Image (spheres, rainbow, N blue to C red):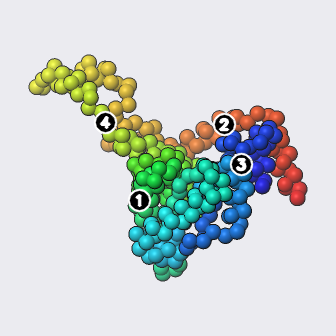
């Protein structure tokens, strides 16, 4: 209800129905249950046509079968429970299919939320939802630890690649780390770079203009060079080849700055130069609202 009040303030007191200001996550209690609190949340959300997003997080070995296929089937069913319930409450209410599986660490019972298994399961679930014609959302990043190391880089890149190739309509969740218990500004910046990299790979390259390249090869012939070739000059500032300022491309020259340092600098500049787009009258009303909450 407080979020609805916040949106009403942002919308200057106008009804928020259909405004698109807020979506609502509705959690499933695995296996295959929805508690009364989340039903109440959905009932309130559909009054305002808020998009409903299932928070479906079965844990293989404890709250879902200790097998990838069983966790996939159960998780899809749980997401559809939320989506179908929202349609019963308000036919035509917007929804986004989402699926967040994990694996139980069987020695301790801990939830391992960002294992590589998650990448495979999310691709499969989104492909299934796309076949049903459902709009989908996918996580673009995530890491088991909070260190900027080889493991977190591999996990983040694989999550970004799976999101990019899955065909999901909405990409979200950049910056999550520490097994989904942390959020890092550097990770947000780096994982956005991973998404750009993944999309670059997924897009491939266009060969419709190959005749120009063949002409270039003919012109330079044996022993020529392409440094001042006409095609080089024409394409010099195009985006045919991968570029991203976060990547250290110094190579054997040395003296480059690490990706984490570049991400830290980028995050700092964003914060330093940030100017809120919220009009002052709305910002003032929000301050008053939060002051009232804190006094309570």
As measured in the structure, the alpha-carbon distance from the residue carrying label 4 to the one carrying label 2 is: 36 Å
Circle 4 packing at 10 Å, graded few (<14), some (14-19), many (20+), is few
- Whole-percent x, y for residue 42 in the image: 68, 58
Residue 244, picture quadrant: top left
- Whole-percent x, y for residue 233 in the image: 31, 20
Say which element carries label 3. Answer: loop
**In this rendering, would 281 be left or right of 42?**
right
Q: Which numbered disc, 3 or 2, marks the residue that appears first in the sequence? A: 3
Say which element carries label 4. Answer: loop
- Whole-percent x, y for residue 254 in the image: 37, 42
- Which numbered circle lies on residue 124? 1
> Which residue matches tag 3?
48
> Which residue matches tag 2?
274
Q: Nearer the viewer, mark 1 or mark 2?
A: 1
Marks 1 and 4: CB-CB under 8 Å? no
> Which residue matches tag 4?
205
Considering only vertical position in the picture, is 82 above or below 225?
below
Residue 25, picture quadrant: bottom right
Circle 2 packing at 10 Å, graded few (<14), some (14-19), many (20+), is few
Circle 1 packing at 10 Å, graded few (<14), some (14-19), many (20+), is some
């Amino acid at each position: 209800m407080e979020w609805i009040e916040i949106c009403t303030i942002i919308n200057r007191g106008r009804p928020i129905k259909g405004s698109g200001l807020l979506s609502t996550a509705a959690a499933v209690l695995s296996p295959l249950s929805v508690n009364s609190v989340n039903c109440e949340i959905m009932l309130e959300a559909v009054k305002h046509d808020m998009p409903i997003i299932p928070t479906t997080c079965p844990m293989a070995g404890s709250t879902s079968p200790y097998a990838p296929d069983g966790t996939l089937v159960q998780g899809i069913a749980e997401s559809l429970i939320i989506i179908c319930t929202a349609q019963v409450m308000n036919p035509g209410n917007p929804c986004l299919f989402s699926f967040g599986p994990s694996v139980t660490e069987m020695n301790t019972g801990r939830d391992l939320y960002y294992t590589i298994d998650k990448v495979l399961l999310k691709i499969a679930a989104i492909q299934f939802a796309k076949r049903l014609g459902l709009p989908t959302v996918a996580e673009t990043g995530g890491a088991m630890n909070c260190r900027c190391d080889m493991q977190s880089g591999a996990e983040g890149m694989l999550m970004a690649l799976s999101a990019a190739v899955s065909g999901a309509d909405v990409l979200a969740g950049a910056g999550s780390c520490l097994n989904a218990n942390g959020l890092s500004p550097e990770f947000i910046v780096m994982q956005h770079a991973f998404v750009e990299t993944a999309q670059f790979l997924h897009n491939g390259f266009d060969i419709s203009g190959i005749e120009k390249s063949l002409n270039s090869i003919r012109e330079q012939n044996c022993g020529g060079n392409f440094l001042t070739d006409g095609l080089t000059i024409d394409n010099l500032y195009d985006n045919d080849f991968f570029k991203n300022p976060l990547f250290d491309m110094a190579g054997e020259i040395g003296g480059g700055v690490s990706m984490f340092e570049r991400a830290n600098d980028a995050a700092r500049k964003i914060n330093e130069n940030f100017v809120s787009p919220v009009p002052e009258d709305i910002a003032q009303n929000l301050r008053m609202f939060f002051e009232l909450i804190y006094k309570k």
